[in-house]
Image (cartoon, rainbow, N blue to C red):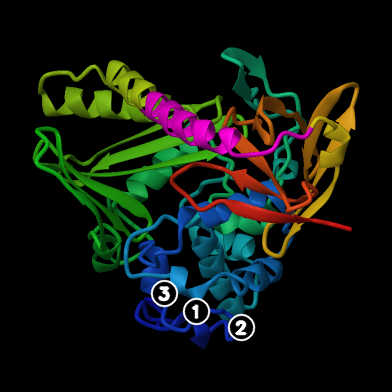
Amino acid sequence: LREKDLLQWKDPVKRYIPEFPFSNLTIKDLLSHKTGLPFYTENLLFTRTINTKEELLEILGKLDANLLTENYSYSNFMYVVLGYIIERITGISWEEFTRKEILSPLKMWDTHFSFSGIKKTQNISASYLIEDGILNKYPEELRNEYMFMNPAGGIISTVEDQCKWILFNLGAKGNIIKKDTLISFQKPVAVVRVSSGKDISYEAYCPGWKFLIYRNEPVLRHGGHVKGYSSEIVILPRRNFGAIILTNLGGSPAGQIIGMYLIDLLLGREIVNWNKRFKEWKKKKDAEEKIKFGNRNKKMVKGITPLCDKKAFTGIYSNNIYGDIMISYKGNVLKIRIKRDWFNLQHLGQNLFEFYDKRNRRLEVEFCTDSNNKIIGLNLWFDLEIPVVNFKKGG
């Protein structure tokens, strides 16, 4: 569209979507995640059902505009908005446009936007998740839970087709866009981190790519994670090299580990034990989280009057942005329902509970009381690094 002069990167998003709530953001800001919209806002997908791009825009309009900055902050929501811009300009769906302008010219015939588009005879890998440290096959039927999110990564593909995508990004002969346009997508825009580390000295985000300087070599990479699946693409433009790693385990770092190992091999440098390094990072993060939550919980539990009757916790709790959640007491177990899913609440002490979601992510629930010790709401903690979400109990 840019080459056809149908849009420019400096154009404000509101030029194409007047109802977009943030007037200062441009197309380039969204492409490079330079909006400052906190990543944790996407947690609302965990608690709220959204079916259309229009619904997403309505919810974005409820967010505090003061959250926005010019800093880097990864946001899948903003890529959905970019897909919506394409639909507004062309008059066709993002899926139709992508098929017509990208997939078909690149002969990516085995790439789809929904599981229903895949023939039953095709060889589809089973998907897995880790529950309580045990690897289990994903129990649900393969489906697109968030079709409206497709522009942010709703691609189902094969290794062969993704190799064609890599060749496109390496500027293969007969490419479908101009070389200058391709290069512009590989230039850093939003700085993520500058480090004096001996391996990775610079990290940034290009339009559509994560960019890093690794051992003085520019590297383009990007990962993707959905239920039961993970992907990782690494490209070294100077070396005319690229690799795609697909993993049938949701949230797995295996793609990054293998990708970095391949880069070490290509550069002919000392091989870093990336598996060990990722394990150390994970162990350190878990330990820090345990300490933070532990210190906070000691203070919180000590200062809250205990409630003996767990039935007092039951009811519907609502948040204007995050939607509704339900607390129920069944079989002597307190449960929390979030959308279709039920989770058991483990008692930490007095009004404080924890549970683990399907991605094995730990969350905490703190029930709030008034001066008469009556439950009036709850706080949902996704992480101590992000603001708590407050839900008000219904009458």
Q: Amino acid at mark 3?
A: Ile
For the record, the magenta segment spans: 285-307
Q: Which mark is residue 22?
A: 1
Q: Local crowd at mark 1 within 10 Å, few (<14), some, or many (≥20)? A: some
Judge whether 327 appears above or below 271 on screen: below
Using the rendered image of the protein, determine whether residue 328 is visible from the camera's viewpoint: yes
Kindly identify which residue carries mark 2.
19
The residue drawn where x is 37% and y is 38% is: 233
The residue drawn where x is 22% and y is 29% is: 263
Count of numbered marks: 3
Judge whether 114 appears above or below 308 on screen: below
Contact between labelled residues 3 and 2, with CB atoms less than 8 Å apart? no
Left or right: 271 with respect to 155?
A: left
Q: Which mark is residue 27?
A: 3
Q: Amino acid at mark 1?
A: Phe
In the structure shown, which secondary structural element does the residue marked by tag 1 occupy? loop
Residue 153 lies in the magenta stretch: no
